[in-house]
Structures are given as C-alpha cells and as structure tokens.
Image: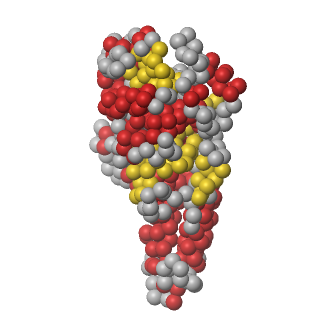
Amino acid sequence: MTLRLYDTLSRSPRAFEPADPGHVRMYTCGPTVYDRAHIGNFRTFTWEDLLRRYLEWKGWRVTQVMNLTDVDDKTIHAAVERGLTLEEVTEPVIAGFFEDWETLGLEPAEHHPRATEHVAEMIELVETLEEKGYCYEADGSVYFAIGRFPDYGRLARLDPESLRSAGRASGDEEYSKDDPRDFVLWKGGERAEEGDVATWDSPWGPGRPGWHLECSVLAMEYLGPTLDIHTGGVDNIFPHHTNEIAQSEAATGRTFARFWLHAAHLLVEGAKMSKSEGNYFTVPDLVERGHRPSAIRYLLLSAHYRSQLNFTVEGLEQADRALDRIDELGVRLAVAPDRDGGPEASGAPGDASPDPLARAAERARAAFEAALDDDLAVSGALAAVFEFVRDANAVLDSGGGSAAARKAARGFLDDFDAVFGVLSLREGERIAVPAETERWLEQRIAERRRARSEGDFERADAIRDEVAARGFVLEDTPTGTRWKLPGSGAGSAAGVAVPDGGSSPAAGGERDDMD
Ligand code: AMP
Ligand code: ZN
C-alpha cells in the first residue's frame, strides 16, 4: 500500500517513495542544548520516531540525522551568565537529552552531530554562497540577501508584506543589513561580542555560525544535497526552514528536501509548552511523580501529528489505562490454554481462516496500515487496535483461539509495537522498581496490617495515601495485600502478596534567535 505524507511545501498529501529505492534520508531538527528538553520538544521527537519506525516497518532502511544545536544565542547567554564554558553548559544538557530519549524508547538516530564539530563546513557553505553572489558582508557579519533568491518564503507562503514585518520582528534591525528581511549566515563583529565563549576564525574575522546555517550544513554533510524528508515543529517553518531552503538551494542548485513535515505543538491550557512561558514539564518531572514512560510516550503519540495536543495529567492517566487494556490482552494471549487441533488451527495471514481470532488480527493489521499510510493517521490506527482488543477478548472469553490464531494475534500486537514502541517500553518498566522502593513498600504494607489489626483505620488509610503519593496502589486480595503500579494488570510491576497472618517482611519558546 502507498504511504502518503502531507508536505508543507505543496500543502497537500503526496505519495512517498525515497529518491534512492529502499533508503530514506531523513533530517530532524534537534534540541538547542542550553536547558533540558521538555515534553513539548519530545512530542516532536517522539512523532519523528514513529515516522522513522513506520518507514522501517514498510521495509525501507532509514538514515536519520538529528543535530544538537550546541552553539547559538541561548547556549552562549547561558555560558556567559553562569561563568561557564560552552561545553560546561551543553554537556550535561546533552547527557539529559539522551537519558530522556532512552526513557521514552526512541530509536537512536544514525547521526547526532553537534554544530560545533562542523564549523569549518559551515564556513565553506558561506564561501560558496559568497562566490555565487547570494550574500554580503557587513560589520564582520555575513547576510543572505533574500531578494537574490526568487523563491524565498514559499514554504511559509509568505508574501512580501508579511516578510517585511517578519524582518522587523526578528529584532536585529539595528544591524547594518541591506534589507531588514535578510538573515544572518555568519555572526561576527558586534554580533559576536560575547565571543570568548564561542568564536571561530573565518574569512570575515572571528565569529560563529547562524542557527539556520547549522542545520543546512549538517543535513547535507551526512545525507547529501537532497533529503527525502525534513521535519520539525511548526514553529520551525519560518524563519528556520525557510532560510535552510534558501541557503541550501542557492548553494547547490538542487531541491533541498523532497518532503517537509511539521508537527503541531503540545499545549498546556491552550498555550504552547515552552521554556519562556515556564509552563513546561520534563520527562523526569513526570517520572518522579510516578507516571510511566510508556504512558507519556503513548499520550504524545495519541493525537495526529498535525493536530495540537493539550497536555493534562488526566490525559496521562487515560493513556496509562488504554495501554493496560492492550497489555492485558498480550498477557491473556500468552497464558490462554492451548486449544489446537481443530480445523480452525491455521492463522496465517491471507488464509480465509475460519478462526475468528486470526480473522480479527488480519482485519486489524489491514486497517492499521491503511490508517498510517494516510499521513500517519494514528487515531485510525489506534481505533483498529482497540477494536482488535475487544474482538480478541470476546473470542478468548468464549473459549476460542487456537495456538496458531493466538500467534497471529500476538503478531499484530508486535506490529503495533514495532511502530508505536509502547508495549516493549512497558515490559521494561515491569522490573524497573528499585529494590529499595520495593522494601519500603513492603514495610508500609506490614505497618498498615498492624494498624488495621489494632483497629486504627485512620492510620491504615494514611499509609495507603502515603503509598499513593509515591505512585503505587495497595490492593487487598484474599491472600493478603500487594502493591502495584496504578492500573497495572496481570503480570505488571507488582509485589508479592503479604499474607495477613504470615510473617511480615524484615522491617526495614521560546527561541529569540530568529535571524
Ligand atoms: P528547540 O530546542 O527550541 O530548537 O526545539 C526542538 C524541537 O522541538 C523543534 O522541532 C521544535 O519545533 C519543537 N518544539 C518546541 N516546542 C514545542 C512544543 N510545545 N510542542 C511540540 N514541539 C515543540
Ligand atoms: Zn534545524
């Protein structure tokens, strides 16, 4: 089936095929590493991971490049303000970024180049543009003359009027540019005054690269002059990607990216989640509050990438419950008694199999792929998954489901997981409760039992609340009390029941770099 992706440049869904058969070259704008990325940034990164995984699932090899913007106004300001070197600011932020990347189960990109490692190539690109007459020097800085690039602004559908106001809004009209709309390629002279922290020699004197230049150079360095897909958040359309197109295409004379894809923002109470608004959460913020990474990942992926998504804790809890339903079916399929032997035993895809479970899996897989082929329509894909969960549970409830059909059913859950990456992430979380926390939970259970046996129910309830505040649930069962993560079903992280009479365990935004 044909994958169609909505291309911002043509404002329409177009059939996707990589230029080089079998191999997709994809560039994804990375974080500015002056402070920990928030889950808004990770909405975009996680969607890019879904796109990557889906391309792989369709059978293509993917080479993904995600840069690390480790030199720009923000990183430099942070270093100057805190009296640190640039690396002292960026290194710990980069480490935190990769921690969160792993926590959310993102597949590693093939290349994560840092801007500071490729300044020589950036200077070369500016020299090429200079030779071709697209730029000019003023006071030690070099500017791209947008009037010399006829197609300028097509990505953002900018008309000359809005461009004029955008030029004013960039806040650098005090610099001596020929036209306020021109953007900076190389920041030198007074634009690099904080330069001690990050300066490179260049033909125009000491300075540093502009942000847009970084991405053009890193993309072409690793992927060649033409990318299949370039992505980012919608805030990148102008000026960042608009300027990337101008400088790359002016330099090479070739199309820079065949498809431009942009993700809408993650919002908090209707406003873009951003550092400058202070309305943000990081991955560790949420994990420390007891939320599971798989639920965070699922929530971030649960809305179509071109729709805004409002972040709420309630939404996170719903995501957790939704995942439990899928997870529980996986456990059920694994433990269901073997009913092999009948004519329904075949579950191979394509068979006109009479087994309703195998048929449900086939139907679900086709609907899942059709939805994702339609510009990654996750709501349709998830609807197919939940319809399957309902149908499969009904078959199992009525005692049906041959071993082969269960395998086909499991196969569909594996397809879902290959693209969404949430079940395997959850699997890892089952064993992720540290031993120390486990001991603490067991102590709480023992103490609560004591309180109850003494008739002190107020104390018993207070202990339950104390445990809940750390993100766990106490569940009373006929064989005693056990702890578990909220909403977790059979097989999820859970403590062994402590029998009532038994021995108790040992006490123990955002960016102002617009030009
Ligand atoms: P930055 O670190 O600001 O360069 O942003 C890194 C990536 O996160 C870019 O692709 C941005 O478009 C994206 N981004 C920033 N804020 C949000 C948000 N609230 N929701 C979704 N994506 C965002
Ligand atoms: Zn970029």
Please state if 86 lies on the left or on the right of 398 as rendered: left
Q: Which residue is depicted at the point 45% across and 40% down?
A: 252
Tell me if residue 243 comes above or below residue 410 in the rendering.
above
Position of residue 224 measured from the top left corner of the image (x, y, whole percent): 40, 46
Q: Which residue is depicted at the point 57% across and 32% down?
A: 149
Label count reads 0
* Depth order, front residue of 211/81: 211
Tell me if residue 368 comes above or below residue 288 in the rendering.
below
Residue 194's image quarter?
Answer: top left
Position of residue 166 measured from the top left corner of the image (x, y, whole percent): 63, 23
Please state if 420 lies on the left or on the right of 82 as rendered: right
Q: How is the image coloured?
A: secondary structure
Position of residue 47 measured from the top left corner of the image (x, y, whole percent): 52, 46
* Depth order, front residue of 179/259: 179
Position of residue 219 measured from the top left corner of the image (x, y, whole percent): 42, 40
Q: Which residue is depicted at the point 34% across and 21% down?
A: 202
Q: Which residue is depicted at the point 46% across and 31% down?
A: 132
Q: Quadrant of the N terminus?
A: bottom right
Residue 359's image quarter?
Answer: bottom right
Tell me if residue 82 comes above or below residue 108 in the rendering.
above
Q: Is residue 493 visible?
A: no
Q: Is residue 150 visible?
A: yes
* Depth order, front residue of 391/443: 391
Please state if 481 lies on the left or on the right of 380 as rendered: left
